[in-house]
Image (cartoon, helix red, strand yellow):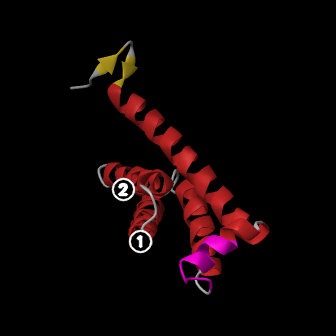
Amino acid sequence: MSFHCCGIPKISLVMNFLNVLIFISSLSFLGYGIAYFKSTKMKSEFKRFGLEKAGAIVAILEILGALGLMAGLMVYPILQISAGGLAILMLLGVAIRIKSKDSVWVSLPALFFMLLNAYIFFISMHIQ
């Protein structure tokens, strides 16, 4: 039995919404990853957290995760690995922000991207 909304199969609506979320996350992480190598502000944030040696690794993981999300549109296991990895990376980012006693407002982007990628991961586990 197929569900429809406005003449469009429901699964198609879910997939289109998921694709938009993947696109948003992918572009954001690609931007953040590249910004680390171009912006002194990004490097100073890692220094403030006492993680200056990890900054380049995190940026590379963000770029790889972003590319993995895009490749995952064709190969779901890559989507699952990338979304799961980015969700864990952002979980650690939220933990660092809490440990540093950053405000909720400053911590919101990390929390948002953690939840976004956890959602992408969860939904992608049910697609085959």
Q: Residue furthest bottom?
A: 53
Residue at 52% from the left image edge and 39% from the top image edge: 20
Q: Is residue 47 above or below residue 3?
A: below
Q: Which mark is residue 101?
A: none
Q: Residue furthest top?
A: 6
State the residue position of label 2.
118
State the residue position of label 1.
92
Give the magenta range. Answer: 43-52
Residue at 38% from the left image edge and 34% from the top image edge: 14
The percent coordinates of residue 38 (x first, y second) are 78, 67
**Membership of 20 in magenta stretch:** no
Question: Along the horizontal axis of the image, is 128 left or right of 24?
Answer: left
Amino acid under disc 2 = Ala
Residue 48 picture quarter: bottom right
Report how far apart the C-alphas of labels 2 and 1 lie in the structure. Answer: 13 Å
Amino acid under disc 1 = Leu
Nearer the observer: mark 2 or 1; the answer is 1
Residue at 38% from the left image edge and 52% from the top image edge: 115
